[in-house]
Amino acid sequence: MRIDKDSGTQIPDMDLGKSPSGFSILLRELIRDKVAFGSLLFLFLIIAGVFGTSIIMDQSEIIKVDLFALYEPPSATYWLGTDYGGRDIFGQLIIGTRNSLAIGFLVTLLTGIIGILVGLISGYYGGTVDNIFMRFVDFFMVLPILMIVIAFVTAVPGYSILSFSLIMTAFLWMGIARLIRSKALQEKELDYVKASKTLGTSDFKIMFFQVLPNLSSIIIVTMTLNLAGNIGIESGLSFLGFGFPESTPSLGTLISYARNPQTLELRWWIWLPASILIFVLMLSINNVGQALKRATDARQRRG
Amino acid sequence: MSLIEVENLKVHFPVRGGIFQTVKDHVRAVDGVSFSIEQGQTYGLVGESGSGKTTTGRAIIGLNDITSGKVLFEGKDLSTINKKEYIDVRKDIQMIFQDPFSSLNPKKRVADIVAEPLRNYENLSAKEERIRVQELMELVGLSPEAIYKYPHEFSGGQRQRIGIARAIALNPKLIIADEPVSALDVSVQAQVLNFMREIQKELNLTYLFISHDLGIIRHMCDHIGIMYKGRYVEHGTSEEIFTNPQHIYTKRLIAAIPDSNPRNREMHYENRKLVKAEYDKLEKDFFDEEGLPFSLKSISATHQVALPERG
């Protein structure tokens, strides 16, 4: 406490920590929006449940073929029945969701880092730097992603979650780079960037500590929405047979069983749970993404 | 020696065109401007939109590249100085921006905004820094408790004061004020201007005051330069410009200052018509074929005018 000179009243010391930061605003908005909050809780439950149970589950046990239990409908032993190899669907669902989510998170994170770096640097400096970076982006844009991923899958037989994420990242960072670049181009024309320059702040600091926070809203929103998209891309590739082999279950491999008309018609327990799960996951992530989008714009906030 | 001397400053922007984006022409935003400012004085740069007054200010502080000419700050030429030395000089030249809404980062608290220059140049502990920021806030007439607020929680005038607090944080010698009040309410303008004069006395600041408002310039400045199309048309002390304008362009500008006394309205109107008639008659003599003013000629020790070549 200190004493005010003029009035003699006591002024409490201000708290030295952060004032309402962006994070608490996001949280408040999420709590205020019931649907988004429900989605977030649901996502947490799914993620915790999936990653929790997958620790105690044995992947090699689940993918073991059991010829005495082909196409078993759901029962007490097999909660969601078995597939054509007698493998437990419930176990595959857990492991598959874990794999799909892990890839989604990893790809989103990696594309985010590369995209932000490239976009920010080329947008902030503009001119020649921008030209060089954008020609790189253009080059990657014209590559046939599907073809290259398929070629990769055929060429490398034993690929893992990490290598699969890396190959996807290599072809998916351009979108966010372009977005960040266009925003950075706008932002750097504002006077606060010029003010920082005249105050002697280095370009690096201006980019990452002045401009980047002003792009946080757009980054959070695109990353969240990209997460849903990236899980979808993985599932899509697996569905087409170019994702993971059956020995590494994912949501896509489970859904791909539905390509068999008999399975599609008679054995719903094989593909329906995975389909519903991916639908609900996407919906929840998008709900949360929308709420975050609102939170970053003070005019649209509800809380 | 003057604090800052600008000699024949030129800032040209290339105009690109054609298939290969080759340089077709140049926009001569600033085309040969010279002036000098003494320590503790206020120099006013006046002109219409696009006359190059802001570009001049920005070239001095390094936001626009100088095409040719010299900017001597305490004897050092800013256009040829190396990066390391420039960092030191930059500390002594600061800028107040026109728009108080975009010149403060909306994601930063006032404490961080005002402390930005301190963090770049002075190694203060967190506590020292906070005390210094609060001192600065008090100096600009804002509550020291307000440092934990965000810029959007302040009014335009208060925001401009925050901008000023940031500019004076390093005790600079020269402040370039680029239309510091034109984005503000008229009632707040006087308040900010008077406050700028107060801190000028208090901290012995030198101002380069850029404005299009002659009333404000008259109120603030010791010397005035009037720009037109990147060149000077007239230069002199405030007294000389306002009581004895020589160039027809200056005369028209001064005639355009509104008079608040309604009894003089008729007279003022007649005077404006006279000045306009003179301007129309003499326009060909006072500007060359491209419509640019001629080079300056001294008519007294402090007063220079771009008079026609032939007498």
Image (tube, rainbow, N blue to C red):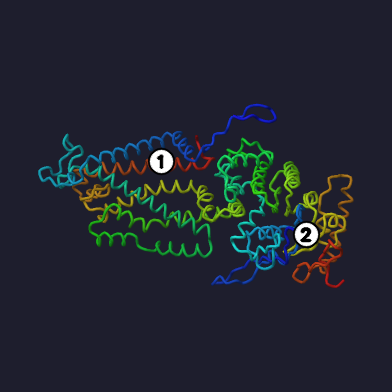
Residue drawn at x 30%, y 53% as measured from the top left? A162
The correct choice, above or below, for A36 with respect to A148 in the image is above
Q: Which residue is mark 1?
A: A287
The correct choice, above or below, for A285 with respect to B50 in the image is above
| Amino acid carrying mark 1 in the image | Asn
Q: Which quadrant of the structure image shows residue B159?
A: top right
| Amino acid carrying mark 2 in the image | Ile
Question: Where residue B140 appears, x then y in whole percent?
Answer: 69, 41
Q: Secondary structure at mark 1?
A: helix
> Left or right: where does residue B94 sit relative to residue A246?
right
Chain of the residue on which disc 1 is drawn:
A
The N terminus of chain A - image quarter: top right
> Left or right: where does residue A97 sit relative to residue A16?
left
Which mark, by number, is residue B226?
A: 2
Q: Residues within 10 Å of mark 2 (few under 14, many from 20)?
A: many
CA distance for labels 1 and 2: 59 Å
Question: Where residue A172 appears, x then y in whole percent?
Answer: 38, 56
Q: Nearer the viewer, mark 1 or mark 2?
A: 2
Q: Secondary structure at mark 2?
A: strand
The correct choice, above or below, for A110 with respect to B153 in the image is below
Question: Where residue B31 appears, x then y in whole percent?
Answer: 71, 66
Depth order, front residue of A280/A40: A40
Depth order, front residue of B15/A200: A200
> Left or right: where does residue A169 sit relative to residue A211?
left
Chain of the residue on which disc 2 is drawn:
B
Contact check, label 1 and label 2, Cβ < 8 Å: no
Question: Where residue B40 appears, x then y in whole percent?
Answer: 76, 52
Q: Residues within 10 Å of mark 1 (few under 14, many from 20)?
A: many
Q: Are marks 1 and 2 on the same chain?
A: no
